[in-house]
Amino acid sequence: MRIAVDRRRCEGHGLCEGQAPEVFTLDDEGEVQSPFFEADLPGELTGPADRGVSACPVAALSLVG
Amino acid sequence: MTTTTPVPTYDEDIYADEALLEPYEHYRRLRNLGPAVWLEKHGAYAVTRYADVRAVLADGDTFRSANGIALNEPANSAILGCTLASDGELHAHLRQVVAHRLTPRSLRPMKEQVTEAADALVAQLVQRGSFDAVADLARALPLSIVPDFIGWPQEGREHLLRWAGANFDSFGPVNERVEKALPQCGEMAAFGAEIVRTGNVLPGSLGASVLEARDRGEVTTEQTMMLMLDYLAPSLDTTISAVGSAIWLFGEHPDQWDRIREDPKLIPNAVNEVVRYESPISSFGRLVERDTEIDGVPVAAGSRVVVSYASANRDERKWADPEVFDVTRKDAVHQLGFGYGEHGCAGQALARMETESILTALARSVTRFELGTPERALNNLIRALGSLPVTVHTAG
């Protein structure tokens, strides 16, 4: 399972990072970054990833696969 | 579309004064009736359960905002083409013209200014001891920040609160409040058009950047007029509601204020909980684009839907003890008070910043809020106090 991000929709509200800093970080440009946009989520991070995804106020994040 | 499934109906006026004063029992009954309930008085389906509200907001292709936000035609026509009332590519385009100025990163330089304004305001009110938490605090901070940020000229500011309230009132079903509001919305639109015509906005402001986007040909002059109001109109009443409700809730629940004082890091979550518990905007409408179902209830193309954030935020199916105000609530971030999805509130970072700054400043010195008798300000969409006398007690 990976995380998909809709870059056009993301506005850098950062609520994902607030919920799951081990999965999401906002870079200096306010862009959300995650190793799991490219790589599979390890099982122990699916819970935090889901919390971060569901906290996104503009539905820019989703879990895929 | 023909169907044999009976659709539950509800015959009470949920926009009557009594319902606006005590809405939550209506919402509970609507949630229990079904996923989509036909509101006989208003000619629309109410969507009131958390999962359904979230699903509707996530499906902008089926549930359209153009001609859909308000429960009456004149208001829908008046706002057609603004960001709030547009869809798909047009909406995404209009939104990015303004939203890039509202992102948390863009707002970083504002943080110091908002913090200083909140600190100074709170220090002055704490010294006074007794004040009106709505007029003197909840209204004072946004009015000292937002008009400058948007670049609104000094002349005309005296109308802002009245216009902003009328804007939300106008979205209701045809009732006295709508009739009174529509001419005032016209005044606001005319003023916004005049600003665009004369270019009379503060340099460096959000309004100035919208005019620059027009000059670059990114938006038309007509769209620019809409954009001038798009972010001003919703930026005042909403934050004012949240701050007023916060003081009221912390006055009623001193144990929750103790939690905040013990651990100010809870403040961002507390803001989510305030917005969950007393959602500033009760609902927005949508227009159904094609025959669909809402959680099994068939809804025909052309139907109106009232998407109730305030009910979703109290849904027993989603929340443990939804009637309990709990600043440590683990999933408070899931509240839908700012909406959700492509139309999710673009100004929420600024709203959060303002509200958090006020609570942070208060938490440093105020130990108790002693409440007088609150008065509600009735509005078709905004749930807010109009007045809240309070006496603050301090440790020293």
Image (cartoon, coloured by chain):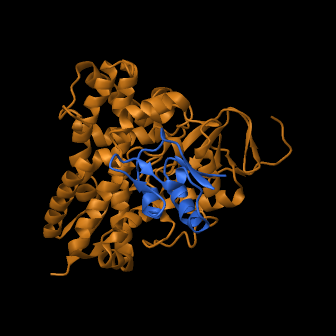
At which x and y percent is residue B279? 46, 56
Horizontal side of B40 relative to B178 (left or right) equals right
Colour of chain A, in one word, is blue
Pick out the residue farthest to the front. A39
Horizontal side of B391 relative to B247 (left or right) equals left
At which x and y percent is residue B57? 58, 45
Pick out the residue farthest to the right. B4
Q: In which quarter of the image is the N terminus of chain A?
A: bottom right
Q: Which quadrant holds residue B393?
A: bottom left
Residue at point 43% right, 59% down?
Answer: A17
At which x and y percent is residue A32? 43, 50
How many numbered dots are placed on residues in this image? Answer: 0
Residue at point 44% right, 65% down?
Answer: B273
Residue at point 38% right, 42% down?
Answer: B234
Q: Residue B49: in sight, yes or no?
A: no
At which x and y percent is residue B332? 48, 65
Question: Can you tell which chain is drawn orange?
Answer: B
Q: Which quadrant holds residue A15?
A: bottom left
Nearer to us in this view, B23 or A3: A3
B366 relative to B205, above or below: below
Nearer to us in this view, B40 or B35: B35
Q: Residue B268: in sight, yes or no?
A: yes
Residue at point 58% right, 47% down?
Answer: B307
B243 relative to B210, above or below: below
Nearer to us in this view, A30 or B197: A30
Nearer to us in this view, B243 or B40: B243
